Amino acid sequence: MKQIPAALQAHYDSGGTSVAHAIVIERTDGQLFGFTSHDLPLVLDVTPWGMSSVALAFDAMQGLTASNLVSTSGFAVDNLELITLDDGSLFQRDEVLAGVWRNAGFRIFRYRWDVAAPTIANDVEILTRGWFGEVTLNAATIKVELRGLKQLLQQSVGEVSTKTCRNRLGDGRCRVDLTPWTHESVVTAVADKRTFTASGLVHGADFFGEGVLTFTSGANAGLSQKVRSHGASGQLTLVLPMVMTVAVGDQFSIVAGCRKRLMEDCKGKFGNVLYFRGEPHRPTTDDLTKTP
């Protein structure tokens, strides 16, 4: 059951309320943003919610509009969207395309505003929380789908048999220690945002194919992309081009690739056959239905 602070409940019961709504957003990189529907900003301590900021300022000028919250008593997903003008002050289009806002967490709450006291205590009522979903770039606005906790109940749970391994390299089921397989390098020549050459990658061809590259400096710092192919001389081609410009001197870390094959990768490269999770020798439908 949701608990409403006693002071706020007393304000509700008074019959003459002065409340506003606000949203706090926490990106996966730890940056916090706060916005209020009121025309005056406020300051709130958000550390009780597990966030790092002690006094977060909530902006009243951003022009954010949240659609009406549709809350259901069953397991249907709540419907909520966030719309803001595309003025580049918050949702920069390049950052949206690069995935900086992907899976950002949010909390929407209601609070009692007071002109004489713009800084309030944690005397608020949490209405909903969850994560960012799809971000749509329109001509003059940006629309964000806000997914509540019940969205998790819509996800399919289970596995299907596959020829290749279903683990992700280094995860809890794979158990490969990624430390010795992670290398640092720097860009030495650039063809485009997807293809460039790096120094120090003296490994054989395709060693980093299907690996993950994460930039640690430059315009793409903090952004990751999967490697499509790797040449023996350090040429790298990414699956998708980086949104920001790749420049000579940009530093990055790169993890060796795993194409999830039993013999070539799990046994020959990582020596991890014991934790291989795939069925490469499973009979196919043709094998089962062919004439003896």
Image (cartoon, rainbow, N blue to C red):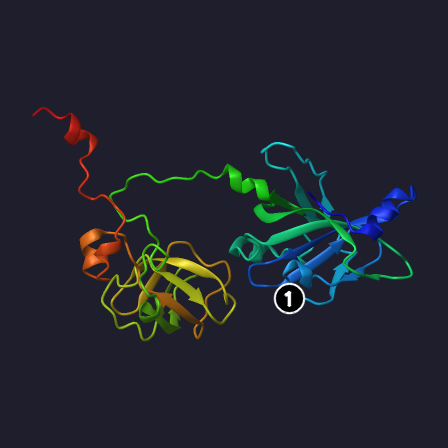
The residue under label 1 is 52
Image location (x, y in percent) of residue 288:
16, 29
Q: Report whether residue 280 is seen.
A: yes
Image location (x, y in percent) of residue 192:
42, 62
Q: Quadrant of the C terminus?
A: top left
The residue lying at 70 percent from left, 39 percent from top is 69
Q: Report whether residue 38 is seen.
A: no
Kindly give the residue lying farthest to the left in the view shown: 292
Image location (x, y in percent) of residue 21:
77, 49
Kindly give the residue lying farthest to the top in the view shown: 291
The residue lying at 24 percent from left, 67 percent from top is 232
- Viewer-side residue, 267 vs 133: 267
Tag 1: residue type? Ser
Residue 157 as seen in the image, left or right of residue 281: right
The residue lying at 23 percent from left, 51 percent from top is 261
181 to 283, vertically: above or below:
below
